Every structure is written in structure tokens, then in C-alpha cells.
């Protein structure tokens, strides 16, 4: 049985096999959790992202998909980059399906690499504008529905408000 855990903290400090990055489709870095991962993980991550862009994702990584790179200097082994939907750019139910797909695809990639522990941020709930409680409901629902073969899926919520939202809908 995969344990689903909630912690308040910084995803870049998690000792897990894979940390998930709420990236944007360029894969070339951004703000929020993306900026923190590249800053702390160092240039190796960005170098691999650039290679992936050149080899597979000329137009960028599509929304709802996921791809892995090294985790550079982070304690994790891999970073799984996924692109959440911008809340206002998509309509329901497509946007909910795309957000659920981020979790499903990230888990699929992580399991494929042999990860046993995976940490997620609240994808799309920052710069991409998704209301926290709804984002939490979709995140927890998607992971439960995927039923991954892992030891732990850890949601790492950056602030008390995000942590409380996940606690409420769990
Ligand atoms: P998006 O563009 O998908 O909305 P953001 O990085 O802006 O992604 O925000 C996603 C969530 O990650 C937000 O709840 C934000 O507060 C949170 N966050 C930002 N930095 C970190 C971090 N270092 N660790 C964990 N969560 C973080």
C-alpha cells in the first residue's frame, strides 16, 4: 500500500527518490517551485532540460505530460517535470482532467525509473492560479485513482494555507 503523506515544507529539501517540478512547457525554468528546484539543483538540471527540448519537445512539453531529468545537487535522485494547466486558460472539465493527468503521468514516469518515494508540490496552485482546495482535491483524487506501486507519495506544501487546504480535503 502506498502511503500518502502531507508535510509543510520545501520540496527541494526532501529526501525522496523523485521530486516533481511544477514546470512550464518551455522546460527552461521559471518562478515558484521551478525556480527553487533549478537554483538549488544547479545547472545540470537545466542542461538536461535543454537536451530534452532539442531531442523530443521542440514545441515544449505539453500540458498534462511529465518527463524526468537528473536532480543535480538536490537530495533526490530525479526531478520529474510536469506542466500543469493555467487555471484561466482552460475550461472545466478539460482543465481538471489535465491537472489529474500531471499527477498520473508523473507517477508513471517515476515508477518507470524505479522510484519508491515521490514528492509533489501543489501543481498549478501558484503562478498558474488554481484555487488551492480544488487543486488539492484533484491532486489527492488523481493519486488515489492511479494506485501507484510506491512506498510513499508525499505532498510537500510550501505554506500553512496550502497545507491546511490539503488536510481539509484529504
Ligand atoms: P504553478 O506555476 O504550477 O502554479 P508554482 O511554483 O507557482 O507553480 O506554485 C505551485 C505551488 O508550489 C504553490 O502552492 C507554491 O506556493 C508552491 N511552492 C513554491 N515554492 C515551493 C517549494 N520550494 N517547495 C514546495 N512548494 C513550493
Image (cartoon, helix red, strand yellow):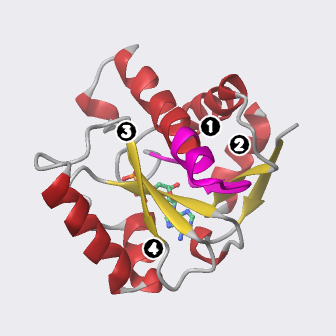
Say which label, 2 or 4, has the lower sequence index: 4
Q: CA distance from mark 4 to mark 1?
A: 21 Å
Classify 42 as above or below 130: below
Q: How many marks?
A: 4
**Residue at the image position 28 percent from the left and 25 percent from the top:** 90
Residues in magenta? 108-123
- Residue 52's quadrant in the figure? bottom left
Look at mark 1 in the image and give the residue it sits on: 136
Residue 78 location (% of width, % of height): 53, 66
**Residue at the image position 66 percent from the left and 59 percent from the top:** 156
Say which label, 3 or 4, has the lower sequence index: 4
Tell whether circle 4 marks a residue whose Cβ is less than 8 angstroms from ligand 1.
yes
- Give the label on residue 166, or none: 2
Say which label, 4 or 1, has the lower sequence index: 4
Classify 14 as above or below 151: below
- Residue 51 left/right relative to 100: left
Q: CA distance from mark 3 to mark 2?
A: 23 Å
Name the secondary structure under disc 2.
Answer: helix
**Residue at the image position 70 percent from the left and 66 percent from the top:** 16
Is 95 inside the magenta-drawn segment? no
Amino acid at each position: 500500500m502506498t502511503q500518502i503523506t502531507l508535510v509543510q515544507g520545501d520540496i527541494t529539501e526532501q529526501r525522496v527518490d523523485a521530486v516533481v517540478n511544477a514546470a512550464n512547457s518551455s522546460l527552461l525554468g521559471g518562478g515558484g517551485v521551478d525556480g527553487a528546484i533549478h537554483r538549488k539543483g544547479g545547472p545540470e538540471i537545466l542542461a538536461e532540460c535543454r537536451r530534452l527540448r532539442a531531442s523530443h519537445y521542440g514545441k515544449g512539453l505539453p500540458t498534462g505530460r511529465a518527463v524526468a531529468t537528473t536532480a543535480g545537487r538536490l537530495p533526490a535522485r530525479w526531478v520529474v517535470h510536469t506542466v500543469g494547466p493555467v487555471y484561466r486558460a482552460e475550461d472545466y472539465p478539460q482543465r481538471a482532467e489535465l491537472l489529474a493527468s500531471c499527477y498520473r503521468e508523473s507517477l508513471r514516469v517515476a515508477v518507470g525509473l524505479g522510484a519508491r518515494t515521490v514528492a509533489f508540490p501543489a501543481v498549478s496552485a501558484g503562478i498558474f492560479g488554481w484555487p488551492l482546495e480544488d487543486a488539492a482535491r484533484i491532486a489527492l483524487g488523481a493519486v488515489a485513482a492511479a494506485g501507484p506501486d510506491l512506498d510513499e507519495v508525499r505532498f510537500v506544501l510550501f505554506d500553512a494555507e496550502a497545507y491546511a487546504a490539503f488536510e481539509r480535503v484529504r
